[in-house]
Image (cartoon, grey):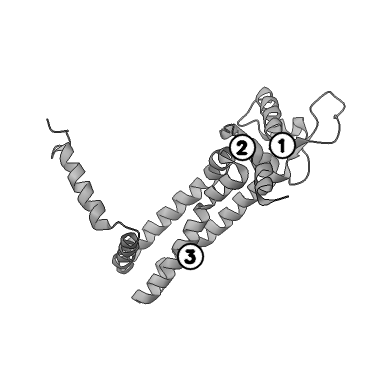
């Protein structure tokens, strides 16, 4: 089997998932390789889905390849127990690992707020390393899209890590506020990197000022 075949077999159908789908998958992920029966699943998900909703969603998620049935009937005519397919489990495992990485980055930022002052060279080295890990973490959405399809990446993986993105961004801003000596240096580092990529803060600010003029001083679009 070549690389293209592996990717094509890993991708889920391009059908959207919503909040209830994600919560249902998260609940079943907690069972690991064990299957969970219908009644037990209804009990676990009663805060966000009715019995009929669980039944309909289960059927759809099985069809899309996120869930698989196994075992036999429970003797009362209910649906057979389900668990995540291994490819869905592997995607959710990636979510879990991404959250662990985000937690480590957040802890590092918190330590930086209380740590010693760094020279320009040390700060640049730290920031470059942090930026690479940060971009690698949230750049995983593209990797997930390649291996699992854009719906799985955009509707399952991304929403489950977006709070980590917000939390890390807020923690980074707290670092800049608590260590003003870092702020100017990091601003300069970012500016140099943008310039090397064909843009700059100066160009961005110039364009911002030009566009602001369209609104006028009172915030209204001038005639």
Give the labeled residue for mark 2: 23
Residue 126 sits above or below residue 75 on the image: below
Q: Are marks 1 and 3 in contact (CB under 8 Å)?
A: no
Crowding near the residue tagged with mark 3, few <14, some 14–19, many ≥20 C-alpha atoms within 10 Å: some
Above/below status of 153 relative to 194: above
Q: Separation of disc 2 and disc 1 at Cα?
A: 13 Å
Query: Does residue 120 sit above or below 207 in this rendering?
Result: below
- Residue under label 3, please give it: 108
Camera-side mark, 1 or 3 = 1
Estimate the spatial distance between the alpha carbons at disc 2 and disc 3, rounded to whole Å: 30 Å
Instruction: Give 220 or 20, whichever is nearer the viewer.
Output: 220
Judged from the image, the secondary structure of the residue bearing numbered disc 1 is strand
For the point 51% across and 57% down, the residue is: 136
Q: How far apart are marks 1 and 3 (CA)?
A: 37 Å
- Foreground mark, 2 or 1, reads 1
According to the image, label 1 marks what residue?
A: 67
Residue drawn at (14%, 37%) of the image: 218
Name the spot of residue 29 as percent of width and height, x first. 69, 43
Q: In this view, does 133 lie to the left or right of 201?
A: right
């Amino acid at each position: 089997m070549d690389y293209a075949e592996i990717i094509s077999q890993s991708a889920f159908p391009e059908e959207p998932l919503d909040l209830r789908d994600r919560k249902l998958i998260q609940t079943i992920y907690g069972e690991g390789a064990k299957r969970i029966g219908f009644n037990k699943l209804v009990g676990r998900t009663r805060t966000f889905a009715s019995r009929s909703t669980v039944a309909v969603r289960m059927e759809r998620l099985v069809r899309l390849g996120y869930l698989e049935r196994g075992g036999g009937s429970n003797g009362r005519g209910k649906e057979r127990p389900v668990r995540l397919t291994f490819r869905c489990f592997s995607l959710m495992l990636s979510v879990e690992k991404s959250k662990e990485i985000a937690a480590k980055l957040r802890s590092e930022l918190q330590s930086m707020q209380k740590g010693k002052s760094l020279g320009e060279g040390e700060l640049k080295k730290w920031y470059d390393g942090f930026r690479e890990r940060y971009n690698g973490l949230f750049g995983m959405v593209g990797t997930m899209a390649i291996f699992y399809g854009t719906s799985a990446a955009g509707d399952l993986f991304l929403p489950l890590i977006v709070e980590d993105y917000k939390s890390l961004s807020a923690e980074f801003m707290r670092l800049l506020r608590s260590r003003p000596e870092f702020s100017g240096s990091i601003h300069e580092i970012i500016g140099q990197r943008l310039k090397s990529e064909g843009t700059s803060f100066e160009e961005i600010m110039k364009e911002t000022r030009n566009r602001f003029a369209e609104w006028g001083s009172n915030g209204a679009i001038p005639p």
